[in-house]
């Protein structure tokens, strides 16, 4: 597919009539107007590509009357510094390789560029020479410039300024009822032009164009629109057209990568016999409530979820996980791109993808990797309909897990919440808007789960701390307390979706110092238990009471142990190793500070958390029959992945925690690493281990904190099998697990 000059382009600048841009991939885009001129006056530079901001993009250079790119071979931050100064920015903050901003077209002018960073011109740097390259456009380099302009830098008036990148698009509702509700699902398609908005002529406009627009607005699909009303509206309101002849295939992630033509200047009467383009979109299930689309949403929801997102701070983003044979697994990032990511996003009820992160950017998963080298056309209804390869352990590791960031509808949730009084923009006392009044929230019952929702609604990521006393924050403008009894599951998009006391505020401590507060963070930890290790190491030990005084002191035995004939007799213990991984994006640190850690003389170290893990034996219907060990643990890095250094250790009152990429191992032979099953009757049971059970420390995903195993106890021996993380199986598999009928022999299947 190509965008070439035609007779309809006669009003454009002469240079454009020789321009023909190949658009075979979604990342190949019309260049942007971000340009600059080198001190030598002979070269011109610009930023191009998508997605990007005004101060970042694919770096392109104009040499010998032709635009071209720079190869990423030997590229460094020093190179980026020189190029950013060409563009009028003071310095660079980063650079990108492998055509992150899309592949350019034309010549690759420079290769193996090596700068010291202080050069006045890229021509002063070493390279292979102009036009001498062994690269392809898959190696086009990009730069990220510091958003600070060089004083006195003058934007050059070069001829390409008319070839604009269409970056900002909106749907403008004109129907009275649609103006008052969110999300906006139907309206006139408008693009940002200068200081205002302009329309698109609907000449040749079809459902494929609407699909692209709806995807950008956060909606999975388009629907037919009644144009009669809009024709009447157009007769009363004179449009100002900017684009025409848009010809999308429907798989693009942004209209800027579709073929289209610009009008020059104000061409209000240029759309002969036409009208402004209009799009109507179908909202996904999460956003359809209240806009008359519940029936449609129900039709969209599959009977069994085959794909999900994990570890994302915002709605519509996360690590991609797919269900195969009843087991959830991840997707390898080989060949992962915006096309495949968009299929995932639309399948989940969001719009097209705005980013396809690789390299486990949303944290590493555990368990199988189901798919590799996924290749999608963009029209598939499911990721499973795309071409892919089966995975082997040699092909991919969880460090290569693929993720997505999807376009989601604008809901305006951030307009009804704010944080005030904090020392930074990421912390403060939470205030919500009820009607036209702002007020604080009672902190009674305010936990990490409620704080998570508040940070999500604010767009600030995860809750690092749920603050219940805010006396140390500025209280000069404190409002009245207007909400109490907030109870959230932690997955809501806004606090208004959580339970409250309603209009009747019931709070014991209503002073400003007891208002609810948050400290938000872009990243969080994510703890998971190594399920297979529990299964491999579980065994029974009859331990003499005279060897359990220390354990009894630390409350590691069941309550009946206190009535035993000490020091005679024994307790029967189910022992197993516990290896807890931090697969998140931030270190796991105990909630309590060092001043409140407790010294345990028996075990000769400080315990930093009163309740870190629960161990329980349950009947198949969920009744607890053996008292769980409410573990007060010392947290440290026992081992780490390759290239990750240990940071935490318990010895000598050291810092405690679990580093990202490390794990804390409690071996089966360590004191208190057990469940006291002395009173357990023979039968079939479920062994359950829950990490961070009270949500004391923020994690990116709490649904994977529980591990369950089948176990059979005959009074002398115990068999433990089928151990798995609580969310590792499908709903059907979990139901079968909980209805476990019992094992008929000692052969573990």
Image: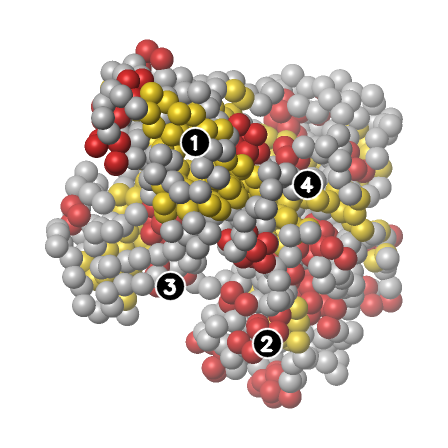
Q: CA distance from mark 4 to mark 3?
A: 35 Å
Nearer the observer: mark 2 or 4; the answer is 4
How many residues crowd around disc 1 within 10 Å: few (fewer than 14), some, or many (20 or more)? many
Percent x, y of residue 584: 50, 36
Residue at the image position 74 percent from the left and 55 percent from the top: 384
Q: Secondary structure at mark 2?
A: helix
Residue designated by label 4: 369
Task: Report whether 591 appears left or right of 28.
Answer: left
Residue placed under numbered mark 3 in the picture: 497
Towards the viewer: 665 or 715: 715
Residue placed under numbered mark 1 in the picture: 574
| Residue labelled with disc 2 | 296
Mark pair 2, 4: CA separation: 33 Å
Q: Are marks 2 and 4 in contact (CB under 8 Å)?
A: no
1 or 4: tag closer to the N-terminus: 4
Q: Position of residue 404 (x, y in %)?
A: 62, 48
Mark 4 vs mark 3: give the one in front: 4
């Amino acid at each position: 597919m190509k965008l070439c000059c035609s007779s309809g382009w006669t009003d454009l600048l002469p240079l454009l009539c020789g321009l023909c841009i190949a658009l075979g991939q979604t990342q190949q885009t019309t260049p942007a107007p971000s340009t600059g001129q080198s001190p030598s006056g002979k070269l011109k530079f610009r930023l191009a590509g998508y997605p990007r901001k005004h101060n970042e993009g694919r770096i392109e250079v104009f040499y010998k009357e032709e635009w071209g790119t720079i190869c990423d071979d030997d590229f460094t931050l020093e190179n980026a510094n020189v190029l950013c100064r060409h563009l009028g920015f003071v310095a660079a903050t980063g650079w990108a390789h492998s055509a992150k901003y899309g592949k350019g077209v034309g010549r690759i002018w420079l290769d193996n560029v090596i700068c010291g960073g202080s050069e006045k011109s890229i021509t002063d740097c070493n390279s292979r020479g102009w036009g001498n390259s062994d690269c392809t456009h898959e190696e086009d380099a990009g730069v990220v410039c510091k958003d600070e302009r060089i004083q006195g830098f003058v934007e050059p008036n070069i001829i390409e300024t008319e070839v604009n990148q269409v970056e900002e698009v909106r749907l403008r509702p004109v129907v009275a009822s649609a103006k008052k509700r969110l999300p906006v699902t139907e309206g006139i398609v408008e693009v940002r032009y200068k200081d205002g908005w302009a329309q698109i002529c609907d000449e040749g406009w079809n459902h494929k164009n609407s699909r692209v627009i709806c995807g950008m607005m956060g909606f999975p699909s388009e629907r037919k629109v009644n144009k009669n009303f809009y024709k009447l509206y157009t007769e009363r309101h004179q449009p100002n057209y900017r684009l025409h002849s848009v010809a999308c295939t429907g798989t693009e992630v942004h209209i800027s990568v579709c073929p289209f033509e610009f009008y020059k200047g104000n061409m209000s009467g240029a759309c002969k016999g036409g009208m402004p383009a209009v799009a109507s979109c179908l909202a996904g299930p999460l956003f359809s409530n209240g806009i008359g689309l519940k029936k449609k949403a129900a039709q969209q929801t599959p009977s069994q979820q085959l794909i999900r997102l994990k570890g994302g701070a915002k709605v519509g983003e996360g690590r991609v996980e797919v269900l195969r044979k009843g087991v959830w697994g991840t997707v390898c990032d080989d060949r992962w791109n915006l096309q495949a990511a968009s299929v995932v996003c639309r399948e989940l009820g969001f719009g097209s993808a705005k980013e396809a992160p690789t390299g486990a950017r949303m944290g590493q998963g555990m368990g199988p990797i189901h798919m590799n080298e996924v290749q999608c056309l963009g029209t598939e209804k499911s990721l499973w309909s795309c071409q892919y390869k089966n995975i082997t352990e040699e092909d991919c590791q969880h460090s290569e897990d693929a993720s997505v960031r999807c376009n989601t509808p604008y809901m305006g949730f951030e307009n009804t919440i704010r944080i005030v009084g904090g020392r930074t923009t990421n912390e403060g006392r939470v205030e919500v808007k009820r009607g036209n009044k702002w007020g604080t929230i009672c902190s009674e019952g305010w936990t990490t789960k409620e704080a998570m929702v508040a940070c999500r609604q604010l767009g600030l990521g995860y809750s690092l701390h749920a603050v219940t006393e805010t006396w140390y924050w500025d209280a000069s403008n404190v409002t009245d307390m207007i909400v109490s009894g907030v109870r959230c599951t932690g997955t809501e998009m806004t606090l208004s979706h959580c339970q409250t006391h309603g209009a009747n505020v019931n709070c014991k401590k209503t002073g400003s110092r007891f208002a609810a507060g948050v400290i938000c963070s872009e990243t969080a930890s994510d703890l998971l238990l190594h399920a297979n290790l529990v299964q491999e190491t579980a065994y029974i030990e009859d331990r003499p009471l005279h060897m359990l005084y220390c354990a009894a002191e630390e409350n590691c035995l069941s309550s009946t142990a206190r009535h035993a004939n000490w020091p005679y007799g024994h307790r029967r213990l189910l022992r197993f190793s516990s290896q807890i991984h931090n697969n998140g994006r931030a270190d796991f640190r105990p909630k309590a500070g060092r001043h409140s850690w407790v010294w345990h003389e028996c075990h000769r170290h400080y315990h930093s958390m009163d309740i870190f893990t629960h161990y329980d034996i349950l009947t198949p219907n969920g009744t607890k029959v053996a008292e769980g060990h409410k573990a007060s643990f010392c947290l440290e890095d026992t081992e780490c992945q390759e290239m990750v250094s240990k940071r935490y250790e318990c010895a000598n009152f050291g810092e405690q925690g679990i580093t990202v990429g490390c794990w804390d191992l409690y071996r089966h032979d360590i004191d208190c690493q057990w469940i006291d099953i002395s009173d357990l009757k023979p039968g079939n049971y479920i062994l359950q281990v829950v990490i961070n059970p009270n949500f004391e420390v923020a994690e990116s995903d709490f649904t994977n904190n529980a591990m369950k195993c089948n176990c059979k106890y005959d009074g002398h021996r115990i068999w433990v099998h089928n151990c798995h993380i609580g969310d590792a199986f499908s709903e059907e598999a979990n139901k079968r697990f909980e209805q476990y009928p019992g094992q008929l022999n000692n052969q573990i299947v």
